[in-house]
Image (tube, grey):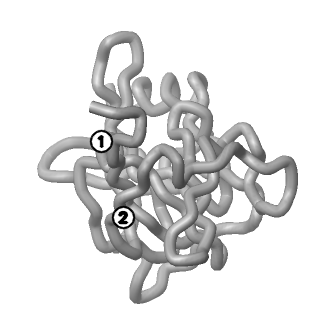
Amino acid sequence: MTDDKLNQYLTFTVAGEQYAINVANIREVLEFDSVTVIPKMPEYMKGIINLRGSVVPVLDLKAKFGIGKIEKATDTSVIVTEMTLNNEAVVIGLLCDAVSEVIDLEDDQIEPTPYMGTQVQAEFIRGMGKKDDKFIIILDLTKVLTHQDLKNVANQSE
């Protein structure tokens, strides 16, 4: 296997910008319906959903990025992701304006994080992917979801 191994990314839109997450972290994509609000959670924690008997917290990416809140529309989706916290799987939903497609990006198609030009904090960005003359912001889930976020999620799921 070479350094140019293919990686698959799910692309989606938040506030008119294209983002991507590696499909290895994605369980499924759901049409957004509604959430149950949990008191005393950070503003970007939209609430929880029941996914086949499991409690899944939902994070509003627009609010997490500090650029407003996602309003429910026809294409609004929840990307159900899985992370590891203290050797335990933590499932969290990411609310986005719309899911686009799965794309293949080779490592050499991903450029370092720019210092300016995006609405998102630079530490949330793993790199910038380029596909068909368009830039796609590749998110680093371990940075978007802070350790405290994951602890809050784990505590709410118990």
Please state, as top left, top right, bottom left or bottom right, where the N terminus lies in the image.
top left
- 20 and 153: which is toward the camera: 20
Closer to us: mark 2 or mark 1? Answer: 2
Categorize mark 2 by other alpha carbons within 10 Å: few (<14), some (14-19), many (20+). some
State whether residue 20 is above or below residue 108. below
Q: Residue at x 39, y 11 (%)?
A: 86
Q: Residue furthest bottom?
A: 74
Q: Position of residue 20 (x, y in %)?
A: 48, 58
Q: Mark 2 is on which residue type?
A: Ile
Q: Secondary structure at mark 2?
A: strand
Q: Residue furthest front?
A: 2
Q: Is residue 66 visible?
A: yes
Q: Position of residue 41 (x, y in %)?
A: 59, 41
- 4 and 52: which is toward the camera: 4
Q: Classify residue 112 by image quadrant.
A: top right
Residue placed under numbered mark 1 in the picture: 24
Q: Residue at x 62, y 47 (%)?
A: 127
Mark-to-mark CA distance, 2 and 1: 13 Å
Q: Mark 1 is on which residue type?
A: Ala
Residue placed under numbered mark 2 in the picture: 103
Q: Residue furthest left?
A: 52
Instruction: Tell me if 149 is positioned left or right of 107 in this view.
Output: right
Q: Secondary structure at mark 1?
A: helix
